[in-house]
Amino acid sequence: MKIGSLDLDTRFEYLIIYKDKRNDTINTWTLGCAFELNYRQMLQSDYVEILGVYKKLTDNQLNEIANK
């Protein structure tokens, strides 16, 4: 496997890590409000294997975790 395109835009809430089977690359994609639609389309694609989906935590959520 090779590294493909890396989208690490911190302004968006979701990060998808996926494998593009056409060129055997690992890629990332950051999304905001369009996450749900794009994620469904990726699941239906024969060319994409979802490796991980992550949602950004708020400062309050991070504080709760850190202070446990």
Image (spheres, rainbow, N blue to C red):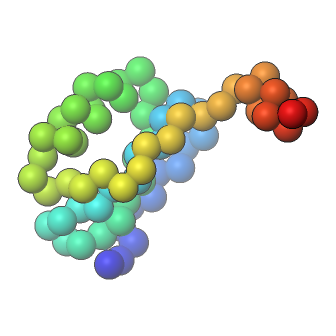
- Give 45 or 6, whichever is nearer the viewer: 45
**Residue 20, percent across and down?**
23, 61
62 with respect to 27 (left or right): right
Question: Can residue 59 be seen here?
Answer: no
Query: Looking at the picture, does residue 48 appear above or below residue 42?
Result: below
Q: Report the residue that reaches farthest toward the right.
A: 67
For the point 20% across and 41% down, the residue is 43
Query: Looking at the picture, does residue 56 appear above or below residue 29?
Result: above
17 with respect to 11 (left or right): left
For the point 81% across and 27% down, the residue is 64
Query: Looking at the picture, does residue 23 appear above or below residue 40?
Result: below
Which corner quadrant of the image does residue 48 belong to? bottom left
For the point 35% across and 65% down, the residue is 26
Query: Looking at the picture, does residue 47 appear above or below residue 61?
Result: below
Q: How many marks?
A: 0
Q: Report the residue that reaches farthest toward the front.
A: 68
Q: Quadrant of the C terminus?
A: top right
**Residue 13, percent across and down?**
53, 31
Q: Report the residue that reaches farthest toward the left.
A: 46
For the point 50% across and 41% down, the residue is 54
Question: Can residue 49 be seen here?
Answer: yes
Q: Quadrant of the N terminus?
A: bottom left
- Give 13 or 43, whichever is nearer the viewer: 43
**Residue 44, percent across and down?**
12, 40
